[in-house]
């Protein structure tokens, strides 16, 4: 009977041992590879900065420099660096007036159309430049090997538009810009000295041609440069692509020349202007806090000279 109890007890112990063995988890094997997986083997002791031992001072650029008093390492506190706003110049910046001397110069070189133009510009943030142009034009052209003269009396033109300065956060004395203009002109044109040859009599006869009143509107896309010459005097060059978008109908066709636009035989135009700038509110740089002031002959300030430094931090 005792032997039977002993066998039963042994069976119970054996079953319990098997169940505990089945529930036990296997521990991972530690190898040389697993001990270096979470370690940066290239990191040096001096790469870490003890933030409890930091002092700060401003450098000559106004940046806050953090100094570890244990290792002597310095880093610039990027969170405290001054942030440059998207546009550093004020809304009301300057205004300018100009005169377009392109047509007067071209007439010296035998151009037989155009006269003179003027412009006014209002600069906002040194980025957006509202423009208004106006001027006078005329034409008196006798094509080669033709028996007539195209004549257009003095007529005004007007343009309005906007320029975008790509260098809006740079020196405002130098502009690279693109823009758009809408131009409009009322004018009158006619053909003079129309003398067709009479085949029967062999003699030319003159035909009168009535004057034609017309209006035309056109669109211009332009790209230009503007540079300072001296003080408030600047010069600007523009290259313009233009196209007539509407014109009053006439029984005699379209005008050869449109004031402010030019002739119809070219889709490109140009201008050369001299400007006088009126500073309304000058602000040539953002307000950035500067570093410590240094008197000539004195040594540069060190972290020990700043009020943020505490000698006890080295202890």
Image (tube, rainbow, N blue to C red):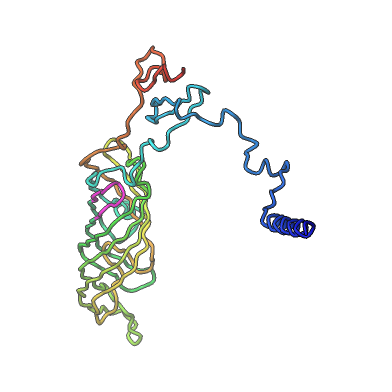
Vertical comparison of 253 with 162: above or below = below
Q: Nearer the viewer, residue 120 or 101?
A: 120
Vertical comparison of 12 with 299: above or below = below
Q: Which residues are magenta?
A: 121-131
Q: Nearer the viewer, residue 296 or 239?
A: 296
Taking the view exactly as shown, the residue that stands out farthest to the bottom is 200
Q: Main secondary structure of the magenta part?
A: strand
Task: Examine the image and state in which quarter residue 282 appears.
Answer: top left
Q: Is-magenta flag for residue 123?
A: yes
Residue at image point 22% right, 57% down? 134
Taking the view exactly as shown, the residue that stands out farthest to the right is 3
Taking the view exactly as shown, the residue that stands out farthest to the front is 1
Q: Position of residue 224 (x, y in %)?
A: 37, 52
Q: Is residue 53 left or right of residue 126?
A: right
Residue at image point 54% right, 31% down? 48
Q: Nearer the viewer, residue 176 or 183?
A: 176
Vertical comparison of 170 with 117: above or below = above
Q: Is residue 48 left or right of residue 104?
A: right
Q: Is-magenta flag for residue 64?
A: no
Q: Position of residue 146 (x, y in %)?
A: 36, 73
The number of numbered badges drawn on the structure is 0
Q: Position of residue 53 (x, y in %)?
A: 45, 25
Vertical comparison of 299 with 157: above or below = above
């Amino acid at each position: 009977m005792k032997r039977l109890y002993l066998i039963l007890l042994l069976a119970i112990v054996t079953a319990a041992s098997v169940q505990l063995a089945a529930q036990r988890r296997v521990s991972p094997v530690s190898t040389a590879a697993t001990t270096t997986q979470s370690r940066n083997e290239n990191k040096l002791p001096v790469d870490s900065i003890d933030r409890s031992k930091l002092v700060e001072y401003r450098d000559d650029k106004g940046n806050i420099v953090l100094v570890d008093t244990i290792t002597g390492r310095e880093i610039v506190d990027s969170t405290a660096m001054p942030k440059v706003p998207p546009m550093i110049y004020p809304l009301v910046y300057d205004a300018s007036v100009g005169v377009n001397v392109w047509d007067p110069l071209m007439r010296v070189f035998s151009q037989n159309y155009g006269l003179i133009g003027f412009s006014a510009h209002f600069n906002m943030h040194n980025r957006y430049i509202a423009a208004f142009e106006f001027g006078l034009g005329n034409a008196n052209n006798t094509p080669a090997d033709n028996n007539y003269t195209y004549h257009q009396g003095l007529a005004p033109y007007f343009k309005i538009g906007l320029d975008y300065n790509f260098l809006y956060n740079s020196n405002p004395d130098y502009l690279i810009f693109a823009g758009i203009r809408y131009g409009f002109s009322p004018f009158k044109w006619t053909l003079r000295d129309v003398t067709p040859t009479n085949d029967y009599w062999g003699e030319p006869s003159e035909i009168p041609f009535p004057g034609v009143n017309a209006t035309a509107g056109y669109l211009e896309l332009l790209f230009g440069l503007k540079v300072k010459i001296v003080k408030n005097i600047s010069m600007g060059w523009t290259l313009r692509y233009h196209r007539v978008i509407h014109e009053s109908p006439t029984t005699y066709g379209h005008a050869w020349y449109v004031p402010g636009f030019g002739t119809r035989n070219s889709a490109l135009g140009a201008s050369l202007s001299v400007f006088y700038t009126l500073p309304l509110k000058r602000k040539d740089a953002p307000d950035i806090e500067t570093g410590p002031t240094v008197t000539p002959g004195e040594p540069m300030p060190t972290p020990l000279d700043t009020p943020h430094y505490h000698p006890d931090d080295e202890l």
